[in-house]
Amino acid sequence: MAHAYTPGLKISAQTIVRSERRLPLMGDVLVEVGNQVSAEDIVAQTDLPGNVQMIHAANLMGTSPSSVGRFMLKKVGDPVEQEEIIAQSNGLFGLFKSEVKSPISGTIENISDVTGQIVIREPSTPVQTWGYIDGQVIEVMENEGVVIETWGTLIQGIFGIGGETVGQLQTIVSSPNQPLTPELIQTDHEGQILVGGSTVDRQTVEFAIDKGVKGIVCGGIDDRELYQLLGYELGVAITGAENIGLTLMITEGFGQISMARQTFDLLLHRQGMKASLNGTTQIRAGVQRPEIVIPLEKDSNSSLDKDRVIIPSALDVGTQVRLIRSPYFGQLGEVTKLLVEPQSLETEAHVRVLEVQLHNQERIVLPRANVEIVE
């Protein structure tokens, strides 16, 4: 039997979540398989080599490259301070000596008798990788990182900005249709991840930043508000490196869109729990969705299936979908019929279509490419 496959967002009340925590280069892994870790724990660390500065010592001292080593006051591996004299020529009868000073603080890495250059490397930068989610270490990648597994709620969004953060989850609106506004944010929301309803604007995000809020999850945002918030247009690449003071995840899309009832109710049910939020979004090769993960105490009746395989999403009658094209953009519905033969559109294109029943009971026919599965 043939199946139709379409992209989808995962919205799961209880599922296995695995997070790969990898260093940017080889380093030290601080945990072992079987260890229980929290989101704030450092699981691996390394040092990023500093930048190098090259000094043309032979030119500065007016000597040949092969003679530079004789005039060095420091040797390879020695630490130096900024403006410290590291080489000095003999001069003429002890006069008119030429000096070479270090432009930076660091370590002498190389002295070349071929080019007459001195290479100084800045101090290394320590890099630490934290757990991100509460869970158990199930795999250690030697000198690289770990894989952490937890049992919990996973909700993926459409778009996000800002990196990883952790905080207590608080829903501060009464319905998925209610926008998040500044007057709803209180001083005691500091350090928390706030859940809104329909939309959020620049003023509210900036107010939340001032109050020390760690993250916001909302249905939609206007692209103009996003531009004003960031100060620049986002390109079609990857987000997550924005340093605006909090992490933002949009669950439905751009514009005035209410959060899906299923998503809102699930977040409301997890009120007060510890959550991990990541706004990183990549929409090209290697698609990555923004996400919120809420670790749970695993039910005794549930089992962690170690061999669980995630397969492409099958589109079938009864599948819950979100419409992603105008004029129904952002609305949710249920597939009621999959038409086998390609149908002709107003554009005269012939494509495969489906019938969807919206929440208001209206039934519409549209191209299969215009929907995504809500898993």
Image (spheres, rainbow, N blue to C red):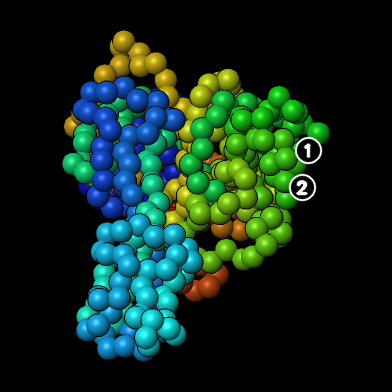
**What's the residue at 42%, 77% (across, down)?**
99
Q: Position of residue 325 (x, y in %)?
A: 56, 57
Residue 267 lies in what quarter of the image? top right
Q: Can you say whether 368 is above or below 293 in the image?
A: below
Q: Position of residue 41 (x, y in %)?
A: 39, 30
**What's the residue at 68%, 62% (across, down)?**
231
Disc number for residue 182: 1
Instruction: For mark 2, give the secondary structure.
Output: helix
Q: Residue furthest top?
A: 300
Tell me the amino acid under the disc marked 2.
Gln
Residue labelled with disc 2: 203
Residue 72 lies in what quarter of the image? bottom left
Q: Residue furthest front?
A: 93
**What's the residue at 30%, 76% (across, down)?**
71
Image quadrant in which the C terminus is located? top left
Q: Earlier in the sequence, mark 2 or mark 1?
A: 1
Determine contact: label 2, label 1, CB under 8 Å. yes
Crowd band around label 1 with a 10 angstrom C-alpha radius: few (<14), some (14–19), many (20+): some
Residue 69 shows in this picture: yes
Q: Position of residue 355 (x, y in %)?
A: 48, 48
